């Protein structure tokens, strides 16, 4: 009789298989944990003599190591490296981060030379598989300042006026222009000219005081700076002082509340007189800053042709840079400098665009009331204030002579007229020059045509300027 044999069981084998599966799963999970490191930085296109870059590195299971080097002319040039102790293969932990402030300039890295190079950053995580991320960024090493040289031989500028200079810059220049009277005016590439030929339309601010520091400036993509003198003949001016203007309570009641209603950021004072001072000083300065910021959005093209046109058949009531005191009950509230021309015609007269351009602003604008600002390109703008209504909207292109709206006395105005201003990079200049085709030909178009293929812009003869403006032309040097 055969012996009884119990059925075989594979419990031990199953247990071994289970333990092996758990071990393999644990090993796979440990292998996969952590992921690839993350790296963030503002990568430079060029590095100078001393360029610093901050790199943010992070890894889910902690950072293992980081290394930075250059590759240049077949050589590997070390910059920086670090290894962190303590790998975290299994136990969970908060993501580990590091902020690496690196000196990457030629003066900071021995063996680095001017010219093209590749910046390499490699970051490894402290997980089981040493996952890493390698980033490569082409850069140009520039340790020498750029060059900037004037091409136009002579520049003549009247205080409160404008002028143009054409100049040459070396490769890699990211920003250039003219610094005059403490204000920087941006330069632009000259259309049709070879690379490195730029021009700058600049102004002699009405309030600049001698000595007048004027220079060309350039900054390259590595942050290196250069300055150069250029031939400039400046003519200081004495602007007109007008008799004091006596305000009444009725005038203040008419002027102040509407402006404050459109300026919620102003904290009103205790009286009408205090609020008038607040408007004529604080708000007016804020608006000048807003116009300066607005000019940064000017198109990089010539949107206009020929001489600018004034309001037809108008009388010039106030000139550019006229100054006047406002008196109330025998006390001087404020002293105003009038940065534009006031042109008066019949009530609600149509206001023409002084030249072709694009509408940058059409709305209530503080002391100017209902206002339109046109962009004419390369930082040149015109402003039309105290309007009654708008016939255009923001973003619209307009042609010379197109009606923008009608005149009125909105804002800080007591009678129907148009306040007309010309602005260069947000700095108000004398409109008289821009009405004069001979001045434009001598100071702008002839220079531009000489060095680029920008065509001379003779335009058509503008309508007759106001008589007072024609009389004031005698105060300028000939074009």
Image (cartoon, rainbow, N blue to C red):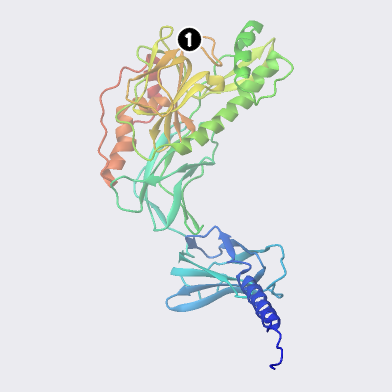
Residue drawn 71% across the image and 75% down it:
86
Q: Residue furthest front?
A: 1
**Residue, disc 1:** 416
Q: Residue at x 47, y 64 (%)?
A: 144
Circle 1 SS class:
loop
Q: Is residue 413 above or below residue 426?
A: above
Q: Nearer the viewer, residue 370 or 61?
A: 61
Residue 110 shows in this picture: no
Q: 416 or 212: nearer the eye? A: 416
Q: Is residue 383 left or right of residue 308?
A: right
Give percent across and percent down for residue 291: 51, 31
Residue 226 in sight from this viewpoint: yes
Outermost residue toward the bottom in this view: 1
x and y percentages locating residue 42 in the rendered image: 54, 57
How many badges with numbers are in the image?
1
* Quadrant (top left/top right/bottom left/bottom right) for the N terminus: bottom right
Q: Quadrant of residue 430?
A: top left
Query: Quick one: 137 or 162, which is closer to the camera?
Result: 137
Residue at 35% from the left image edge and 14% from the top image edge:
312
Question: Is 160 situated above or below 253?
Answer: below
Crowding at mark 1 (Cα within 10 Å: few <14, some 14-19, many 20+): many
Residue 131 image offset from top left, x and y in percent: 58, 72
Rendered view: 220 above or below 394: below
């Amino acid at each position: 009789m055969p012996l009884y044999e119990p059925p075989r069981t594979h419990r031990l084998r199953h247990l071994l298989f289970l333990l092996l599966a758990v071990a393999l799963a644990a090993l796979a999970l440990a292998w996969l944990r952590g992921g690839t490191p993350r790296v963030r930085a503002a990568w430079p296109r060029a590095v100078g003599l001393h360029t610093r870059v901050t790199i943010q590195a992070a890894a889910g299971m902690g950072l293992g190591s980081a290394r930075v080097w250059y590759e240049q002319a077949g050589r590997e040039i070390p910059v920086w490296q670090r290894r962190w102790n303590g790998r975290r293969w299994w136990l969970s932990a908060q993501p580990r981060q590091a902020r690496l402030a690196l000196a990457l300039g030629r003066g900071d890295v021995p063996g680095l030379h001017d010219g093209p190079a590749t910046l390499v950053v490699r970051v490894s995580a402290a997980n089981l598989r040493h996952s890493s991320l390698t980033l490569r960024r082409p850069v140009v090493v520039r340790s020498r300042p750029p060059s900037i040289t004037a091409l136009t031989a002579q520049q003549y500028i009247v205080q409160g006026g404008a002028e143009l200079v054409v100049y040459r810059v070396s490769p890699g220049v990211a920003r250039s222009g003219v610094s005059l009277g403490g204000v920087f005016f941006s330069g632009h590439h000259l259309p049709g000219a070879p690379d490195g030929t730029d021009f700058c339309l600049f102004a002699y601010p009405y309030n600049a005081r001698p000595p007048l520091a004027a220079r060309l400036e350039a900054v390259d993509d590595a942050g290196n700076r250069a300055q150069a003198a250029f031939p400039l003949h400046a003519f200081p001016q004495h602007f007109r002082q007008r008799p004091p203007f006596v305000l009444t309570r009725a005038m203040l009641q008419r002027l102040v509340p509407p402006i404050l209603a459109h300026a919620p950021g102003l904290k009103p004072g205790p009286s009408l007189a205090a609020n008038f001072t607040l408007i004529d000083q604080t708000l007016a300065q804020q608006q000048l800053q807003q116009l300066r910021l607005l000019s940064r959005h000017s198109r990089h093209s010539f949107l206009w042709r020929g001489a600018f046109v004034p309001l037809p058949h108008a009388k010039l009531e106030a000139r550019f840079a006229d100054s006047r005191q406002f008196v109330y009950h025998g006390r001087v509230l404020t002293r105003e400098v009038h940065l534009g021309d006031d042109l008066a015609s019949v009530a609600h007269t149509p206001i023409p665009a002084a030249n072709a351009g694009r509408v940058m602003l059409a709305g209530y604008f503080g002391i100017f009331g209902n206002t339109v600002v046109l962009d004419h390109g390369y930082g040149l703008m015109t402003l039309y204030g105290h309007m009654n209504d708008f016939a255009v909207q923001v973003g619209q292109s307009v042609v010379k002579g197109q009606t923008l709206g009608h005149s009125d006395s909105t804002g800080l105005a007591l009678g129907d007229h148009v306040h007309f201003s010309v602005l260069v990079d947000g700095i108000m200049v004398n409109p008289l020059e821009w009405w004069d085709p001979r001045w434009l030909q001598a100071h702008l178009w002839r220079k531009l045509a000489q060095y680029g293929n920008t065509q001379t812009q003779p335009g058509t003869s503008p309508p007759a300027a106001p008589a007072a403006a024609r009389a004031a032309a005698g105060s300028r040097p000939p074009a």
